[in-house]
Image (cartoon, rainbow, N blue to C red):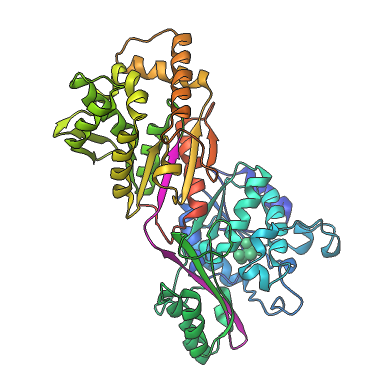
Amino acid sequence: MSLVVLSTQAELEIFRTGLRGPLQFVPTMGGLHEGHGQLIRRAAQQGPVLVSVFVNPLQFGPTEDFDRYPRALEADRVLAQGSGANALWAPSVDTVYPGGLNSVVSRSAPAALQSHLCGASRPGHFDGVVTVVARLLQLVKPSCLWLGEKDWQQLVILRRLVADLDLNLAVQGVPTLREADGLALSSRNQYLSAADRERAAALPAALRRADQNDPKDSVRRSLSDAGLEVEYVERVDPLSLQPCGSETAISLLAAAVRCGTTRLIDHVFLMTRQPLVAIDGPAGAGKSTVTRAFAERLGLVYLDTGAMYRSVTWLVQQNGVDPLDATSIEALLNALDLQLRSLPGGGQQVLVNGQDVSDAIRSPEVTASVSAVAAHRCVRQALTAQQKAMGAKGGLVAEGRDIGTAVFPDADLKVFLTATVGERARRRALDLEQRGFPVPERSELEAQIAERDHLDSTREEAPLVQAEDAVELVTDGMSIAAVVDALVTEFRSRVAEEAWPTPAG
Ligand code: PAF
């Protein structure tokens, strides 16, 4: 496949008009290496790829390496073409900044996101990055922006930019590519002398071997011992980029060093467990469907806690026990063996004392009593304990009413998924109809849903409340695919591909 080389805005426009498929954009400063090659290859699976090469003067400090930054357009062209790009766009400063460098309307990266890591040691750098990327996006108008996870702070800041600009644009991070000795690929590796190149491998090695109890100091010591000059070693929350400790289950341990005259950065994700996601929300918000699809997309185990409460309710009804009789229910709980099994294709099988109740627990009778049964303290305690045990190692997304508040308050991502009562009644009617149950009047369904919301949010034990740090997603008017995409976006802004790769397929 041939690649076109573009420079002016007019050439870019012509390229855009001939596009077949959603445009994938890989912005670079040139000096392309296999790390960029990997970004381009991944992007090319989704649509035509445009790679920009623009060494942005605004993101270099006065004493930094703007003048010596690698510029090798022909080599960039060869690598971009070999990796499957359709176009290489190398605009001039005038195209990107038509008023000239001295009259650019600059943007600022959020202060909180640049108060640590490279933001602290390179004042103004991320302001220059957001200014240029906003401008490039305006010119390129892509469907997806591809960025390396190597520059995690840049990725976090640019995700924020894209969300603020409301561009209807996906942002995709791609894991860092490394040399055989662990050194992360970077355009700046070209500056390293042979001796420095050898020493540089101490950076990834130190991060990889960080002492879990004392990560920052242990890395600092290893780096200094290897003769690298430490600029920073910091442990931060991957989303807020604020310093954190081991209470944060997935954290970013990042370092910048000088190796000779070359500045190198690298990081690892420290994980005390695999990722945990909590999805809460009222009945009928579509949680089960989207959570199942989300779990499958990200290779997480799906835990439907509603099915567990329904199972107990079913058992209560089978035994002719009054749903309000806590003492008799407690006796049933003592003899309960409740098992959830994941089925291929994302389904779930529910076994109560060895009996498959997967369908039976979805009956209108169970629906009518589940709130009353789930309100008993003994029921909540028994099932919460089982859920916590199931999620201890992480690697799981749980869906329910109190996951982010009572079950997994330390979840990496908490979502409160909701929809208006009218929308939920509409979905419930459709679901009953499809499963062959009688469909009540819409007004009756709405009243049932409102009543259930009231019971769930006013019960004493673990009421339905939105966790303070949950992301609220109101799904009226959204397709299932759009909701799942929104969940994946939230997940990926907290959990890197490097930490939890998306399964193939
Ligand atoms: O990461 C880079 O190469 C640059 O910071 C970017 C995103 C192309 C903006 O100039």
Residue 92, percent from left and from top: 74, 63
Magenta stretch, overall SS: strand
Splitting the image into 4 quarters, where does residue 327 fall?
top left
* Residue placed most toward the observer, 449 or 156: 449
Specify whether residue 148 is painted magenta. no
In this view, the residue farthest toward the left is 354
Q: Is residue 188 left or right of residue 431?
A: right
Residue 269, percent from left and from top: 45, 65
Measured along the vertical axis of the image, is residue 268 above or below residue 379? Answer: below
* Residue placed most toward the observer, 489 or 420: 420
Q: Is residue 80 left or right of residue 348?
A: right
Query: Which region shows up in magenta?
Result: 257-280
Label tally = 0
* Residue placed most toward the observer, 22 or 249: 249
Measured along the vertical axis of the image, is residue 165 above or below residue 367? Answer: below
Residue 64, percent from left and from top: 71, 78
Residue 219, percent from left and from top: 48, 79
Quadrant containing ligand 1: bottom right
Specify whether residue 265 is painted magenta. yes
Q: What's the residue at 47%, 48% (across, down)?
A: 413
The reply to whether residue 14 is in sight is yes
Q: What's the residue at 22%, 20% (across, down)?
A: 321
In this view, the residue farthest toward the top is 441
Splitting the image into 4 quarters, where does residue 103 fall?
bottom right
Measured along the vertical axis of the image, is residue 259 above or below residue 170? Answer: below
The reply to whether residue 84 is in sight is no
Q: What's the residue at 62%, 74% (across, down)?
A: 72
Q: Is residue 12 left or right of residue 336?
A: right
